[in-house]
Image (spheres, rainbow, N blue to C red):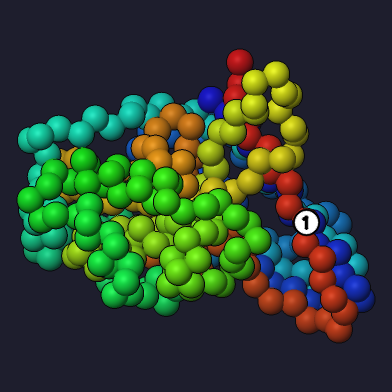
Amino acid sequence: MYDVRHVTRFDYGASVRFARCNLRLRPIIWSGQQLESYQLSIMPFGRTAPVRAEGGLANVLRLVIEEPVRHLTIESAFRVLVDRAVPVPLDTDPTLADIARAARLNRDSSAAGPSAYLFASPHIPLDRDIAAWCAQDLHADRPVREAAIALARRIQREFAFDPAATLVDTPPAEAFAKRGGVCQDFAQIMISGLRSAGLPAAYVSGYIRTIPPPGQERLVGADATHAWVLLWCGEALGWVGVDPTNGIWMAGDHIIMAIGRDYAEIAPIDGIMLGSGAQRLSVSVDVAPVA
């Protein structure tokens, strides 16, 4: 069980007369996790209303600011129970060819169905170089879960975690060429490779429990949002999560917030504002295990 606190603060150079934001800060219902409590605080004020997600799986709240503000703080706090076993690949798992065939024949058109995640999306195009590199682990006759973790671990080994290498809108091809970036980049590279092989792959936004180095205290507020990959592994196995940043499975340390084709569909906060000054954004995230 975890207590999660996510604080986003906007400081504007001049008064903002109007703002409209989409907030995706409440975890979705998903296998292996259960929301125990949730609280949202907006300071100094704001009008909110639930809206339908335009893409992906997300709890979307529309925030409207209609009076001038210079500072805006959005704080999301919740407790979530996570009980998710580590997947165990088996020789009897469906092969990648089996999964690609089953995905083409699947008729589930919902946001949780595989067909929505088979093709390129606005921020994750299919790339020839990425496809060729990923194909080394994606042989058609290989069991699906074995292939998924092998590819995730190769990305973790061969790519450098470097926050200075990329920006939030850096294309996967650029991060791939640099062999560096952050969790968003590694997830997008893996998704591009999987979709190029005809496999349904989704982008996950959420949190991961961070463990400080031996002898050091956890730093409150020093955690961050995280991104990883869901791969559809057939009707029997369903969606299985892999984390290419860390080369691990999605299990008891991962908290899913939202699922979509790419980051643009499930960003924690996005929107527009009307104002003439500069904007400074600061984010503090704390993921604390509950004893």
Q: How many marks?
A: 1
Residue 130 lies in quadrant: bottom left
Taking the spot 86% from the left edge, 84% from the top edge, the residue there is 276
Position of residue 109 in the picture relative to residue 271 (left or right)? left
Q: Quadrant of the C terminus?
A: top right
* Secondary structure of residue under mark 1: strand
In the displayed structure image, the side of residue 227 where residue 140 appears, left or right: left
Q: Nearer the viewer, residue 58 or 251?
A: 251
Task: Locate residue 46, reporting x and y percent.
Answer: 77, 62
Residue 132 in the image: state x and y as whole percent: 25, 67
Is residue 201 depicted above or below 284 in this figure? Answer: below
Relative image position of residue 113 (x, y in whole percent): 25, 58
Q: Is residue 72 above or below residue 67?
A: above
Other residues around mark 1 within 10 Å, as few (<14) / some (14–19) / many (≥20): few
Image height of 141 relative to 109, above or below: above
**Left or right: where does residue 115 sit relative to residue 39?**
left
Q: Amino acid at mark 1?
A: Ser
Instruction: Give the residue at mark 1.
Output: 282
- Residue shown at the point (73%, 63%) measured from the top left: 47
Q: Mark yes or no: residue 228 visible.
A: no
Establish if 225 lies above or below 210.
below
> Depth check: 254 or 129 in front?
129
Name the residue furthest top.
Answer: 291
Residue 85, quarter of the rendered image: top left
Residue 209 visible in the shown view: yes
Residue at the image position 43 percent from the left and 46 percent from the top: 156
Q: Position of residue 142 (x, y in %)?
A: 12, 47
